[in-house]
Image: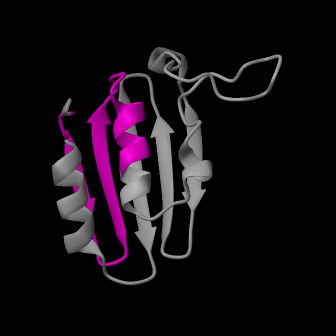
Amino acid sequence: MTKLKLLAVGKSSKHNYYIFPKEQVFFKLARQLLDGLGFEKHDYSAFGIPIDKKWGEPIPNKEENIKNYIDSRYSFKNKEYYVDIIFGKEKIFLMIHTEKDEQQKLARLIKRLR
């Protein structure tokens, strides 16, 4: 499994953020993270995946170039988590908001992915 370096972390009881370098592997790791947080597959399966213009469906086994994601924000929400992913020029900012203290669970999940 490809790992991604963690550049910075900020934590409180209901808000956590993580900063990663902008690397192509992030798309795969973000989809794994969202799956680990209990998101439905249809909520995240096309994240970073190009869409077929004719059929409007994700193209399997392809990813968009992460360098094309600049100054853009993507949000995902389920019953327990609100996740924001913000792409900068050289870094990716991942913010996870919860209604209850989930620091230990999030730390274990992020550790497995990076």
In the depicted structure, whether residue 52 falls above or below residue 15:
above
In the depicted structure, whether residue 106 falls above or below residue 56:
below
Residue at 37%, 46% (x, y): give it.
32
Residue sitting farthest toward the bottom = 100
Residue 90 appears left or right of 85: left
How many labels were placed on the picture? 0
Residue at 55%, 51% (x, y): give it.
41
Residue at 23%, 53% (x, y): give it.
110
In the depicted structure, whether residue 78 falls above or below residue 25:
below
Q: Position of residue 2 (x, y in %)?
A: 20, 29
Q: Position of residue 31 (x, y in %)?
A: 43, 43
Q: Which residue is nearer to you in this view: 52 or 111?
A: 52
Q: Position of residue 10 (x, y in %)?
A: 25, 59
Residue 78 appears left or right of 36: right
Q: Which residue is nearer to you in this view: 19 or 51?
A: 51
Q: Position of residue 1 (x, y in %)?
A: 19, 33
Residue 19 among those drawn in magenta: yes
**Magenta stretch, residue numbers:** 4-32
Residue 101 among those drawn in magenta: no
Residue 114 sits in which quadrant?
Answer: top left
Residue sitting farthest toward the right = 54
